[in-house]
Image (cartoon, grey):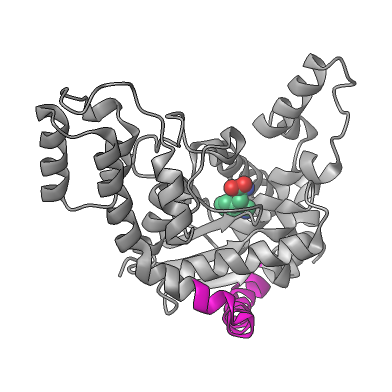
Amino acid sequence: MSDKIVLTGIKPTGTLHLGNYVGALKPLVEMSKSNTTFMFIADLHALNFMRDAAALRRHTYEIAAILVALGLDLKNAVLFRQSDIVQVPQLSNMLMNVTPKGLMNRAHSYKAAMDKNAAAGLDTDAGVNMGLYTYPVLMAADILLYNADIVPVGADQKQHVEFARDIAGYFNNIYGETFKMPEPVIGADTGIIPGLDGRKMSKSYDNIIPLFAPSAELKKKIMRIITDSKLPEEPKDPDTSTIFQLYKHFATAQEVAAFRDKFVAGGMGYGTAKTILFEKIDSALAAPRAEYERLMANTDLLDKILVDGAARARAVAEQTYARAHRAMLG
Ligand code: TRP
């Protein structure tokens, strides 16, 4: 058991896919076995663009169910809903006062929104609300409240964690040592997980394979993976094949080596390779998928898990918030 505190948030915005599983969920579940891990569903962070409360609630349950079904260790892991901790918006509001506006101007996500507007000939701030603009401050509150040492995130979130460090630094400079400095940890190098069309698997490319799709849907998706036009007898390149690149993450080292040999030797058509891939993923995910379905049919249980998690998170958040409050207001 390491004494490092791990923390991360997942936004409840839609279907999680195999790319999320390999790149983020699986390593997080592993990490929860040996570290205190605060893991929350970042529903407040979704509010700047999600306006459908029922969908938000459903996606929140989905993420909780996925994590539990994948074996998140609920002794070490504190799983909760961000919005259940009132100290998050409270601290965020306090931190606004030590956060330079210029820092927010430099945020990648805000700059991307401005660039998109400029390209469309619109006012650069068109459609930008304060939730989007101050997103990094809310995220700093999340991170600093629970005294996180390590924040595992995707590369796209690294800047936000660096901002949390900056904001903690400004605060500590003015008010004295109050917050611990978090470290971003960019996911272990799982490489790019390709989607159906060979590009990175991403909702925005519409090329995803949902994590817990029922068998029939999983099969249909896998059969749609785009390949080159090599004939069955021809040797094939496993390193550029989406089929092989996905297989790698679900099979043992021995199975992977054997599958690689079949690609290189020739004699295996892509249809056969897809069937092998389907069977591998389907069996690897069968047990957690059944557990996921059981949990989704029992949201009372999920609520109980989330309420328990919130109580544990709140105990820490209250202390940190009290420290900040005392420092600022005496
Ligand atoms: N912004 C993160 C994302 O979009 C989610 C998130 C919210 C988060 N708060 C966090 C991640 C705190 C790490 C730590 O993916």
312 magenta-colored? yes
Write down the region rendered in magenta: 293-320
| Residue toward you, 61 or 72 | 61
35 relative to 261 in the view: left or right: right
Q: Main secondary structure of the magenta part?
A: helix
User: Would residue 154 be found to the left or right of residue 62 on screen?
Assistant: left
Residue at image coords 46%, 29%: 199
Is 61 placed above or below 11 here?
below
Image location of residue 20, percent across then percent down: 47, 49
Residue 38 in view, yes or no: yes
Q: Looking at the image, which residue is at 51% across and 79% down?
A: 294
In the foreground, 42 or 323: 42
Q: Looking at the image, is 99 positioned above or below residue 281?
A: above
Give the left or right position of residue 262, taking residue 16 as reference. Answer: left
Q: Would you say residue 148 sits in the magenta stretch?
A: no
Q: Position of residue 32 (x, y in %)?
A: 39, 66
Quarter location, residue 324: bottom right
- Which residue is at a point 39% across and 34% down the rendered structure image? 192
**Can residue 70 be seen?**
no
Residue 42, image x, y percentages: 65, 58
Left or right of 259 on screen, residue 173? right
Q: How many marks?
A: 0
Q: Quadrant of the N terminus?
A: bottom left
